[in-house]
Image (cartoon, helix red, strand yellow):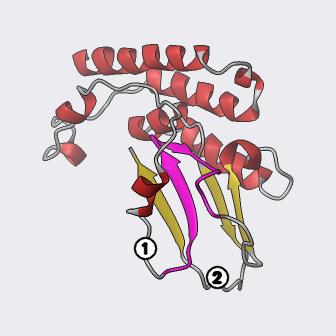
């Protein structure tokens, strides 16, 4: 249909641009899942109001936006300070323009039983490899175009594992700055 051709093709072109910026990362395990998801997306169609499950939901504005690849940038620490919760000693994970920024995050001294690892490392790490690859495989082959789209452009997600019976007293605070 016209919706499939227009939007899927546009995201396909953006994925090709994304691949050109990877600077050797195409060989990483994470990229295998991204490529698989991009291929899956090319075979899918975004839902429209003609689909029973989405008859009251229009994705037109969402799909017609001009999307661009995220750009790593420095953010004034005072701008991030406004997003922190005063008086709460949290484990903070900072994402700037959708990209995880370890230098702005506070993950030191994680409590026993809590693992937080960037997804590009977790996909190959001995303690998380099978779990992460299992979920990435599910997402890369999803029949939901939004899941396939998200997986296609996954760059710097976070893998969080809480061991059974672990007690984590400090909250994990996600800070997203765009």
User: Which region is colored magenta?
Assistant: 88-106
Query: Which residue is label 1 attached to?
Result: 85
Q: Which residue is mark 2?
A: 168
From the viewer's side, name the closer residue of 70 and 54: 70
Could you say whether the residue bearing mark 2 is in a helix, strand or loop?
loop
The residue that appears at 23% across and 26% down in the rendered structure is 64
Q: Quadrant of residue 117?
A: bottom right
Answer few, some or many: residues within 10 Å of disc 1's Cα (few below 14, many 20 plus, some between 14 and 19): few
Q: Which residue is at a point 26% across and 17% down the rendered structure image?
A: 1
Residue at 73% x, 78% y is 111
| C-alpha span from label 1 to label 2 | 18 Å
Camera-near label (1 vs 2) is 1
Estimate the x, y position of residue 144 in percent, counting from the top left.
42, 39
From the top left corner, tell me how far across and down residue 67 is, in percent.
35, 26
Residue 171 sits in which quadrant? bottom right
Q: Is residue 34 left or right of residue 161?
A: left
- Taking 118 as reference, is 21 left or right? left
Check the image and report above or below for 83 versus 70: below
């Amino acid at each position: 249909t016209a919706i499939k051709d227009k939007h899927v093709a546009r995201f396909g072109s953006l994925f090709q641009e994304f691949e050109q910026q990877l600077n050797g990362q195409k060989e990483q395990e994470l990229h295998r899942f991204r490529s698989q998801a991009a291929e899956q997306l090319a075979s899918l169609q975004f839902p429209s109001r003609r689909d029973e499950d989405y008859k009251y939901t229009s994705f037109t504005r969402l799909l017609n936006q001009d999307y661009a690849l995220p750009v790593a940038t420095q953010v004034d620490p005072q701008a991030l300070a406004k997003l922190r919760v005063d008086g709460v000693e949290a484990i903070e994970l900072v994402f700037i323009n959708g990209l995880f920024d370890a230098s702005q995050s506070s993950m030191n001294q994680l409590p026993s039983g809590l693992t937080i690892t960037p997804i590009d490392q977790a996909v190959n790490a001995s303690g998380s490899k099978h779990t992460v690859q299992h979920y990435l495989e599910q997402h890369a082959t999803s029949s939901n175009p939004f899941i396939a789209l998200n997986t296609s452009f996954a760059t710097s997600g976070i893998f969080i594992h809480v061991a059974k019976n672990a007690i984590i007293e400090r909250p994990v605070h996600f800070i997203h700055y765009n």
